[in-house]
Image (cartoon, grey):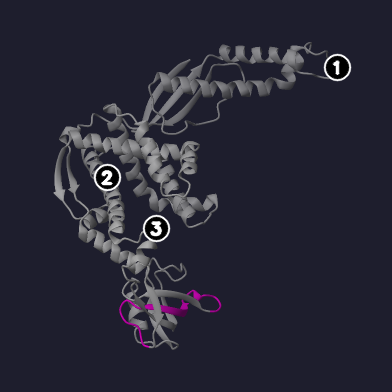
Amino acid sequence: MQVSVENTSALERRLTVTVPGQEIQGKVEAKLRELCKEVRIKGFRPGRVPMSVVKQRYGEQVRQDILNETIQTSLQQAIQDENLRPASRPSLEAEPKNEDGSDFEFSALVEVYPEIGELDAGAMEIERPDSKVKDEDIDEMLQTLRKQRKAWNAVERTAQADDQILLDYVAETEEGRVPAAGNQRFAIIMGESGFDELEEAVVSIPAGEEKNVELTFPEDFREPALAGKKASVDLTVVSVSEGSLPELDEEFVQGFGIEDGDLDTFRVEIQNNLERELKQATSTVLKARLIEALLKASPDLEVPASIVRQEAAGMVAQILQAQGQQVEPEQMESLVEPFMERAEGRVRAGLLIGELAQQNNIQIDPEKVRAAIDTAASTYEEPAEVVQLYYNSQQLMQQVESSVLEEQVVDWVLENAKVTPREMNFQDVMDAATSR
């Protein structure tokens, strides 16, 4: 077998493979001789079918099978011999043929991973969030929990700040009526809806009354037919409710699983939860800053287009699954395009982190994998069943192992890079993490 390699682009190679015709012919004849002993054809004794009959009936199929097998094995051997790292399956440029017994030649395009030079962690400069959970953070969380348990009581007046408003609406756009029939009902909390035009309109409408207004709906409005559009809207205020916060008493505390109803015990539980969240958020921020440092060190790194598209498709699939939606395969292409830029960044980051791990012999720690699974399972009613689910799923295990390896790389970089602590409060760290 002869192999030639041509660089068609930074991340694509053309492999041209030539296999001697006599080698192909020898394999074809060997397979036909086996068939002579195995096939059953009417008029001939088992194992005594003449070669000419077997060749006439099976020769073309046998040759094609041998050619396909040769392509697969030759490509694997060529990729190994040339030390290539394929990013996707090789694709044949044309359907090869070998009808006259001449040398069998074919060409295939192979997308490869980029070659990444040495990554010097010692030269990286990273800011590390320096934060602790304080009493005021616990107080703020208690207030948040009280708001979540707020009781709503109907009042006979127009809306004020922090009131809950129950609305019916019918909208007329250039495309038509929304909804097509009847009214649409939903609730907002004044000052929290993010729809300022709507809040300004309902503040002057008493409960039970209707008003026509012109509104421009937000881009993320929950009704797709209205999102980002102007409409003439008939609004009806069904009810106005005023909220009242529960007292921080024993009953309230028990509602969160603290059996003795002790507020101090509850504060300790909240502190433990916030510290876990802070640890995770700090890790997320550090990972993001590590990625920024790696990208700065390798600004021109190209990544395989096929891997980027797979990543983008995975992002879309995750969103659709969360929304309980399904789309036809032909629709997926248009959905993937808006995610390509983000996907490219994620692929580039993943390759650099993986390369940093490989260059410094950072191996996945099984104990940390187990700890990560236990932590994830602890939030469910039957943790043991969830743990078993992880270990029985190759996909889930790969996700956990990838996450653990990234954390190990971050820890290693923090020990070797130029790290500067930066004092931040709890909420600043959380905001920095969620903005990534």
Q: Is residue 174 above or below residue 14?
A: below
Q: Is residue 147 above or below residue 29?
A: below
Q: Residue at x 31, y 68 (%)?
A: 248
Which residue does the numbered mark 1 point to in the structure image? 43
Contact? badges 2 and 3 (CB < 8 Å): no
* Residue kind at label 1, given as amino acid type: Gly
Q: Residue at x 32, y 34 (%)?
A: 354
Whichever of callouts 2 and 1 sits on the residue coming sooner in the sequence is: 1
Q: Which type of secondary structure does the marked residue at label 1 adopt?
A: loop
Per the rendered image, the range of residues in magenta is 157-182
Q: CA distance from mark 2 to mark 1?
A: 76 Å
Contact? badges 2 and 1 (CB < 8 Å): no
Whichever of callouts 2 and 3 sits on the residue coming sooner in the sequence is: 3
Q: CA distance from mark 3 to mark 1?
A: 83 Å
**Residues packed near mark 2 inside 10 Å, few (<14), some (14 to 19) or many (20 plus):** some
Q: Which type of secondary structure does the marked residue at label 2 adopt?
A: helix
Q: Residue at x 51, y 56 (%)?
A: 324
Image coords of residue 346 (percent x, y): 34, 44
Badge count: 3
Which residue does the numbered mark 3 point to in the structure image? 257
